[in-house]
Image: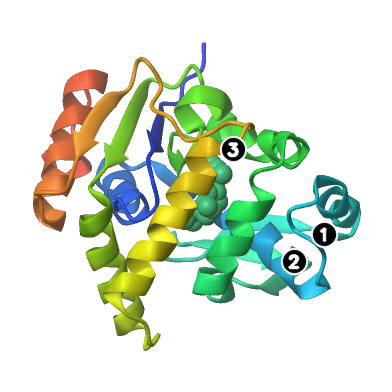
Amino acid sequence: MNKFYSIAVDGPSGAGKSTLSRRCASAFGFIYVDTGAIYRSLGLAAYRKGINRENEAEVMAILPETEVKMAYDENGEQRMYLNGEDVSAEIRLPEISACASQVSAHARVREYLLEMQRKMARENSVIMDGRDIGTVVLPDANLKIFLTASSEARAQRRLLELQQKGVDTSFEQVLHDIKQRDKCDSERAAAPLKAAADSVLVDTSELDFEQSFQKLCEVISDRLNIERIEDRK
Ligand code: DC
């Protein structure tokens, strides 16, 4: 029997999956795995090569010369390496979000990246976030959470994040990008974004970060019957 716990967190972009999953992972002593960062790294590689990212064969062709690696630094933060170069910051740029969405639409690309994600869950207790974790990557996860929020609430949060990073943009632009990405992620043929039938739905539109965090901790504690590290005697 697998002695590790796995929690799948899926949902649209900007629902707070990564920040909340990271915080919950640390509260329960799990490893946080951000699978979007894998697609982003590949999206960046495709962008740099200047290939047609909507063409599956062209994306597949760069895979043999594209090494994407995930590692954790001394603070437990996930870092991404593209052919040995730390690209953790660059993959967050808005233009790379769109590239990630394009390369992630290809079934063979997704298949290629599957084992890397499953291996993490075989070897650790994980909270893994993405779009298809509960449906495809970890169908046997101990707990599946579908985290969502209205597109306006998500755009507002993303706008703040980008502004804090000094990116010059507007609410309308961010909302437009979010809707575009939602459409692309949920309408693609390969592993579209959808809630697993056995997932717990958590809508954070009306919740601030702290409330969302408390809500998720409750769901995790109740469903897995485990306590946060700070509550363990
Ligand atoms: O979660 P994110 O915004 O970093 O994800 C970037 C893109 O990668 C997003 O458009 C959807 C895609 N993605 C995916 O298809 N499957 C995953 N498990 C994670 C991300």
Residue at coordinates 71% horizontally, 41% vertically from top-left?
106
The residue that disc 2 covers is 45
Work out whether 53 lies above or below 182.
below
Res. 35 in view: no
The residue that disc 3 covers is 188
Q: Does the residue tagged 3 have its C-beta within 8 Å of any atom of ligand 1? A: yes
Given the image, on which type of amino acid does mark 1 rest? Answer: Thr
What secondary structure is found at the residue carrying circle 1? loop
Q: Nearer the viewer, mark 3 or mark 2?
A: 3
Residue 142 is drawn in which quadrant?
A: top left
- Measured as percent of width and height from the top left, residue 46 is found at 76, 64
What secondary structure is found at the residue carrying circle 3? loop
Q: Nearer the viewer, mark 1 or mark 2?
A: 2
Res. 73 in view: yes
The residue that disc 1 covers is 66
Q: CA distance from mark 1 to mark 2?
A: 7 Å
Quick one: label 1 or label 2, which is nearer the N terminus? 2
- Measured as percent of width and height from the top left, residue 44 is found at 68, 67
Q: Are marks 1 and 2 in contact (CB under 8 Å)?
A: yes
* Side of 46 relative to 81 (left or right): right
Given the image, on which type of amino acid does mark 2 rest? Answer: Ala
Given the image, on which type of amino acid does mark 3 rest? Answer: Arg
Work out whether 81 lies above or below 18.
below
Q: Residues within 10 Å of mark 1 (few under 14, many from 20)?
A: some
Work out whether 167 lies above or below 105.
below
* Side of 46 relative to 231 (left or right): right
Q: Please identify the quadrant where the C terminus is shown.
A: top left
Residue 144 is drawn in which quadrant?
A: top left
- Measured as percent of width and height from the top left, residue 131 is found at 48, 39
